[in-house]
Amino acid sequence: MSVSVERALSWCQKLIDKSPGFPSLEECLPKIPQLDSLADLPAGTRVLVRCDTDVAFLPDGSLEEDVRLRSLVETLRFGVAHGWVQIVFGHIGRKKENSLKPVAPLLKKILEEAGVQCGELNVLTDWMSDATGEISDATAAAVAQLPNGAIVILENTRAFELERALWKVKKDELPAIAPKIAAYANGMYGKLAKVHVNEGFASSNRDLSSTVVPLPMDRIALGKYIDGEMRTHLPRTRQSELVIFSGMKLEKLDDLQAILNRGQVKMVIAAGLLAMTLQKAAAELDGGTFEMGSAGSDPTNKFYIPPERIEQAKTMVSNGRKAGVEFVLPVDFVLADGTPSDVIPPGGSQLDVGAKSIALHAAKVGEFITYHNQKVAAGKGPAVVFHNGVFGYFEKDEFATGTKQFMLQLKRMTEAGLWVYVGGGEGGAALHKYGDDSWVTHCYTAGGTILKALGTEPIPYVKALYLAATKAV
């Protein structure tokens, strides 16, 4: 249906608002249709399919991994089998100049290997006006001419500034962009398709392609892959009581805080920059101190930890302790010159955990396995584990020991009967480098999406699909 500027504004306000009272993921999913609900759509129906096209290329032009493209196969197979014209759209990276043209032949090959014949996969460029949000007539004409069962790709959605208009926008800024967003929604509906399927599991930011496209649509649904992840694995992962969290991005402190706020976690094993922040906070809470090296003294260092992050961590540690959360932090390190040390020297840096920390991790995992066994004996098990990140600069062998050894702990817990989930990203890369998927219950393809799902705020595209399905705006 046509979208007024006022309705677009109201929709966007809902999307950016904090939502403490919004239904949980478990409550949202039954309201969002599955792909099979669209089986009655006739051949020739135009369907917009938001896909995971954000892949990385190696220097030789091959894919670093193709799991995201393979995740699209069953949904696209369903559409081809029903004779739909599927309009695939998604992003690749964050640079405007990135293109999906190299992705098209790789997706075509994957589909053909899976027995899905879809003809040429052309990429349509300049399909939207950044200045107005309008969809081009040329794109509409190209889509209208496609035969039943065809698939076409819209060029990188992030080639347009408008795509990210809702990322950091403030509420008082929304009225100025609402007309463009309404034009975008109306163009997608009026010129391209009236049905939307979301198969973009990893696309968890407030991109317009994920959060605004559902607004005007007559029919919506979750794709096959994303539906399976959402209904099977994510509800279990949200019950995690042991969280292994590491990395060099301080934003992960926000993610960990959101996870702790849900009140499920009993133990946190941390490493990396995140652990240093927590260690400094814990030391100051206990009347002591902790030397963070250059991360605490050099504001020009990209790994610098500012005072406000320490204060945030103090609140987290204090509240966590009151709730009975145990924080397991490194007790020794491997320094940048490769030497082991119980402390980080002033001006120095740590790039891995040391042997004492590895032993501590093994002991704490043993304690958690005992807790799991007690849960199972009481009929309340299994216990659930979530692992995210790596313990050091694991790309270099001399700093990979902590990460490598913890992969064995994941295997140990899985063999003991725990449900062990890995959040993708670097954690998934480490699992595939030092072990394989059989070592865990499930390894996700989208670390950012999982972090959002484990927090207190809804995943933006789940929020949008729920609002569309329930006609809440």
Image (cartoon, rainbow, N blue to C red):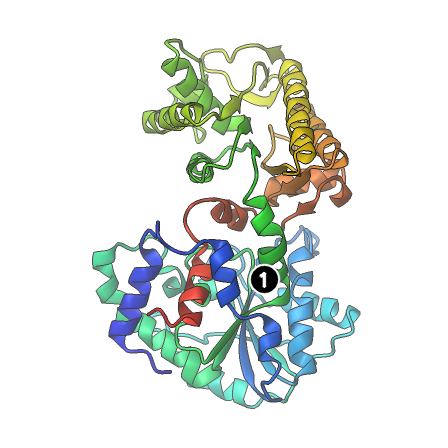
Q: Residue 276: in sight, yes or no? A: yes
Residue 169 left/right relative to 268 = left
Camera-side residue: 253 or 89? 253
Q: Residue at x 45, y 17 (%)?
A: 292
Q: Is residue 225 above or below residue 379?
A: below
Q: Residue at x 43, y 40 (%)?
A: 258
Q: Is residue 325 above or below residue 136?
A: above
Residue 143 left/right relative to 368 = left
Q: Is residue 213 above or below residue 82?
A: above
- Res 306 → quadrant: top left
Quadrant housing the N terminus: bottom left
Quadrant housing the C terminus: bottom left
- Image position, residue 147 (x, y; %): 63, 89
- Image position, residue 5 (x, y; %): 26, 74
- Image position, residue 271 (x, y; %): 55, 26
- Image position, residue 399 (x, y; %): 65, 25
Name the residue type under label 1.
Thr
Camera-side residue: 19 or 64? 19
Q: Residue at x 28, y 67 (%)?
A: 10
Task: Write down the residue under mark 1.
Answer: 53
Q: Is residue 35 above or below residue 328?
A: below
Residue 360 left/right relative to 162 = right
Camera-side residue: 456 or 283? 456
- Res 244 → quadrant: top right
How many neighbours does mark 1 have within 10 angstroms: few (below 14), some (14-19), or many (20 or more)?
Answer: many
Q: How many marks?
A: 1
Q: Residue 132: in sight, yes or no? A: no
Label 1 residue SS: loop
